[in-house]
Image (cartoon, rainbow, N blue to C red):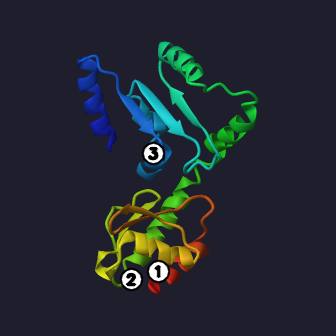
Amino acid sequence: MPVSNMEAVYKVAKENQVPVHLDGARLFNAAVAERKLVKDYTQYTSTVQICLSKGLGAPVGSIIAGSESFIEKARKWRKRLGGGLRQAGVLAAPGIIALTDMVERLEDDHIHAKRLANGIRNIEGLSVINKVDTNIILVDTSEKGLSSKVYIERLKEKGVRAVSFGPTTVRLTTHHQVTKEQIDKVLFVMQGI
Protein backbone atom coordinates (compact mmCIF):
# COMPACT_ATOMS: atom_id res chain seq x y z
CA MET A 1 0.00 0.00 0.00
CA PRO A 2 1.48 3.37 -0.93
CA VAL A 3 2.29 5.78 1.89
CA SER A 4 -0.21 8.25 0.39
CA ASN A 5 -3.03 5.71 0.92
CA MET A 6 -1.94 5.18 4.51
CA GLU A 7 -1.94 8.92 5.09
CA ALA A 8 -5.51 9.21 3.70
CA VAL A 9 -6.78 6.31 5.84
CA TYR A 10 -5.06 7.72 8.93
CA LYS A 11 -6.60 11.17 8.38
CA VAL A 12 -10.14 9.75 8.19
CA ALA A 13 -9.53 7.45 11.15
CA LYS A 14 -8.10 10.26 13.29
CA GLU A 15 -11.07 12.53 12.48
CA ASN A 16 -13.34 9.74 13.70
CA GLN A 17 -11.17 8.78 16.68
CA VAL A 18 -10.43 5.30 15.32
CA PRO A 19 -6.94 3.92 16.01
CA VAL A 20 -4.99 2.54 13.06
CA HIS A 21 -2.83 -0.57 13.54
CA LEU A 22 -0.19 -1.61 11.02
CA ASP A 23 0.56 -5.32 10.83
CA GLY A 24 4.16 -4.78 9.86
CA ALA A 25 5.16 -8.42 9.40
CA ARG A 26 6.74 -7.43 6.08
CA LEU A 27 7.15 -3.71 6.75
CA PHE A 28 10.91 -3.69 6.22
CA ASN A 29 10.51 -5.49 2.88
CA ALA A 30 8.01 -2.84 1.77
CA ALA A 31 10.24 0.02 2.93
CA VAL A 32 13.31 -1.38 1.15
CA ALA A 33 11.37 -2.11 -2.05
CA GLU A 34 9.92 1.41 -2.12
CA ARG A 35 13.20 3.03 -0.97
CA LYS A 36 11.40 4.59 2.00
CA LEU A 37 12.10 4.72 5.71
CA VAL A 38 10.00 2.57 8.04
CA LYS A 39 8.86 5.75 9.79
CA ASP A 40 7.39 6.99 6.49
CA TYR A 41 4.77 4.26 7.01
CA THR A 42 4.48 4.22 10.78
CA GLN A 43 3.85 7.96 11.10
CA TYR A 44 0.31 7.22 9.89
CA THR A 45 -0.49 4.59 12.49
CA SER A 46 -1.44 4.47 16.14
CA THR A 47 0.33 1.15 16.70
CA VAL A 48 2.60 -1.14 14.70
CA GLN A 49 3.81 -4.71 15.04
CA ILE A 50 7.08 -5.72 13.40
CA CYS A 51 8.09 -9.33 12.81
CA LEU A 52 11.79 -10.01 13.30
CA SER A 53 11.72 -13.58 12.02
CA LYS A 54 10.59 -13.24 8.41
CA GLY A 55 12.98 -11.46 6.06
CA LEU A 56 15.06 -10.14 8.93
CA GLY A 57 16.20 -13.64 9.83
CA ALA A 58 15.77 -13.77 13.63
CA PRO A 59 14.68 -17.21 14.85
CA VAL A 60 11.64 -15.79 16.65
CA GLY A 61 10.26 -12.49 17.83
CA SER A 62 8.10 -9.51 17.14
CA ILE A 63 8.03 -5.95 18.41
CA ILE A 64 4.95 -3.89 19.08
CA ALA A 65 5.08 -0.10 19.28
CA GLY A 66 2.59 2.57 20.21
CA SER A 67 1.86 5.23 22.77
CA GLU A 68 3.08 4.82 26.33
CA SER A 69 -0.47 4.10 27.55
CA PHE A 70 -0.97 1.49 24.81
CA ILE A 71 2.30 -0.27 25.67
CA GLU A 72 1.34 -0.31 29.35
CA LYS A 73 -1.95 -2.06 28.46
CA ALA A 74 -0.16 -4.41 26.05
CA ARG A 75 2.30 -5.48 28.75
CA LYS A 76 -0.53 -6.28 31.13
CA TRP A 77 -2.35 -8.34 28.49
CA ARG A 78 0.84 -10.13 27.51
CA LYS A 79 1.31 -11.25 31.13
CA ARG A 80 -2.35 -12.21 31.50
CA LEU A 81 -2.08 -14.39 28.42
CA GLY A 82 1.11 -16.08 29.65
CA GLY A 83 3.58 -14.09 27.59
CA GLY A 84 6.22 -13.46 30.25
CA LEU A 85 9.71 -14.74 29.43
CA ARG A 86 12.68 -15.43 31.61
CA GLN A 87 16.12 -15.15 30.04
CA ALA A 88 14.62 -13.19 27.16
CA GLY A 89 18.06 -11.90 26.19
CA VAL A 90 18.74 -15.14 24.35
CA LEU A 91 15.89 -14.22 22.02
CA ALA A 92 16.52 -10.48 22.09
CA ALA A 93 20.08 -10.79 20.75
CA PRO A 94 19.01 -12.20 17.34
CA GLY A 95 16.29 -9.53 17.25
CA ILE A 96 18.92 -6.82 17.61
CA ILE A 97 20.96 -8.41 14.82
CA ALA A 98 17.82 -8.55 12.67
CA LEU A 99 17.30 -4.81 13.08
CA THR A 100 20.92 -3.72 12.80
CA ASP A 101 22.39 -6.07 10.19
CA MET A 102 19.60 -7.63 8.17
CA VAL A 103 17.52 -4.69 6.89
CA GLU A 104 20.00 -3.44 4.30
CA ARG A 105 20.46 -6.91 2.80
CA LEU A 106 16.70 -7.34 2.15
CA GLU A 107 17.33 -5.85 -1.29
CA ASP A 108 19.34 -8.99 -2.13
CA ASP A 109 16.20 -11.07 -1.46
CA HIS A 110 14.21 -8.81 -3.78
CA ILE A 111 16.85 -9.12 -6.53
CA HIS A 112 16.83 -12.91 -6.18
CA ALA A 113 13.03 -12.95 -6.34
CA LYS A 114 13.05 -10.90 -9.54
CA ARG A 115 15.67 -13.24 -11.04
CA LEU A 116 13.49 -16.22 -10.13
CA ALA A 117 10.34 -14.58 -11.50
CA ASN A 118 12.05 -13.65 -14.77
CA GLY A 119 13.25 -17.23 -15.18
CA ILE A 120 9.80 -18.65 -14.45
CA ARG A 121 8.29 -16.42 -17.12
CA ASN A 122 10.38 -18.39 -19.64
CA ILE A 123 9.02 -21.78 -18.53
CA GLU A 124 6.15 -23.06 -20.65
CA GLY A 125 2.94 -23.60 -18.70
CA LEU A 126 3.90 -21.38 -15.75
CA SER A 127 3.06 -17.73 -15.24
CA VAL A 128 4.02 -15.26 -12.54
CA ILE A 129 0.78 -13.61 -11.42
CA ASN A 130 2.02 -10.93 -9.04
CA LYS A 131 4.16 -7.86 -9.43
CA VAL A 132 7.42 -8.96 -7.83
CA ASP A 133 8.44 -5.96 -5.74
CA THR A 134 9.74 -7.80 -2.68
CA ASN A 135 10.67 -11.43 -2.05
CA ILE A 136 7.42 -13.23 -2.90
CA ILE A 137 6.63 -14.85 -6.25
CA LEU A 138 3.17 -16.27 -7.02
CA VAL A 139 3.12 -18.82 -9.81
CA ASP A 140 0.03 -20.09 -11.63
CA THR A 141 0.31 -23.79 -12.57
CA SER A 142 -3.06 -24.17 -14.30
CA GLU A 143 -1.63 -24.21 -17.85
CA LYS A 144 0.46 -27.23 -16.82
CA GLY A 145 -2.76 -28.97 -15.80
CA LEU A 146 -1.44 -29.36 -12.27
CA SER A 147 -2.87 -28.30 -8.95
CA SER A 148 -0.61 -26.35 -6.64
CA LYS A 149 -0.56 -29.34 -4.30
CA VAL A 150 0.73 -31.71 -7.00
CA TYR A 151 3.23 -29.16 -8.30
CA ILE A 152 4.56 -28.53 -4.79
CA GLU A 153 5.00 -32.27 -4.22
CA ARG A 154 7.00 -32.54 -7.45
CA LEU A 155 9.16 -29.60 -6.38
CA LYS A 156 9.68 -31.19 -2.97
CA GLU A 157 10.86 -34.44 -4.58
CA LYS A 158 13.61 -32.37 -6.24
CA GLY A 159 14.58 -30.53 -3.05
CA VAL A 160 12.64 -27.30 -3.61
CA ARG A 161 10.23 -26.04 -0.94
CA ALA A 162 7.17 -23.97 -1.78
CA VAL A 163 3.66 -23.48 -0.38
CA SER A 164 0.19 -23.40 -1.85
CA PHE A 165 -1.49 -20.03 -2.23
CA GLY A 166 -4.62 -21.35 -3.90
CA PRO A 167 -5.84 -24.29 -6.00
CA THR A 168 -3.36 -23.58 -8.82
CA THR A 169 -1.14 -20.93 -7.22
CA VAL A 170 2.27 -21.70 -5.74
CA ARG A 171 4.09 -19.23 -3.50
CA LEU A 172 7.89 -19.07 -3.58
CA THR A 173 9.81 -16.83 -1.18
CA THR A 174 13.45 -15.79 -1.20
CA HIS A 175 15.31 -15.05 2.03
CA HIS A 176 18.80 -14.49 3.39
CA GLN A 177 19.79 -18.16 3.06
CA VAL A 178 18.91 -18.37 -0.65
CA THR A 179 21.79 -17.82 -3.06
CA LYS A 180 21.92 -16.91 -6.76
CA GLU A 181 23.13 -20.46 -7.49
CA GLN A 182 20.11 -21.90 -5.68
CA ILE A 183 17.80 -19.68 -7.74
CA ASP A 184 19.37 -21.14 -10.89
CA LYS A 185 18.90 -24.67 -9.49
CA VAL A 186 15.21 -23.97 -8.75
CA LEU A 187 14.71 -22.75 -12.31
CA PHE A 188 16.39 -25.89 -13.66
CA VAL A 189 14.10 -28.06 -11.49
CA MET A 190 10.99 -26.12 -12.52
CA GLN A 191 11.94 -26.45 -16.19
CA GLY A 192 11.76 -30.22 -15.80
CA ILE A 193 8.31 -30.42 -14.19
Which numbered disc, 3 or 1, marks the residue closer to the eye? 1
Where does the image place residue 165, in percent across and percent down from the top left?
38, 60
Left/right placement of residue 75 relative to residue 124 reads right
The amino acid pointed to by label 3 is Ala
Which numbered disc, 2 or 3, marks the residue closer to the eye? 2
The amino acid pointed to by label 1 is Met
Q: Which mark is residue 123?
A: 2
Q: In the rendered image, which quarter is residue 177 located in? A: bottom right
Q: Which residue is mark 3?
A: 31
Q: How many marks?
A: 3
Q: Earlier in the sequence, mark 2 or mark 3?
A: 3
Q: Does dot 3 land on a helix, a strand or a loop?
A: helix
Question: Foreground: 127 or 84?
Answer: 84
Name the image quarter holding the N terminus.
top left
Q: Earlier in the sequence, mark 1 or mark 2?
A: 2
Q: Which mark is residue 190?
A: 1
Task: Give the spatial CA distance, label 3 vs label 1.
Answer: 30 Å
Which numbered disc, 1 or 2, marks the residue closer to the eye? 1
For the residues bearing labels 2 and 3, Cβ distance under 8 angstroms: no
Task: Give the spatial CA distance, label 1 vs label 2.
Answer: 8 Å
Question: Foreground: 43 or 78?
Answer: 78
Q: Residues within 10 Å of mark 1 (few under 14, many from 20)?
A: some
For image coordinates 60% across by 65% down, the residue present is 178
Name the image quarter holding the C terminus.
bottom left
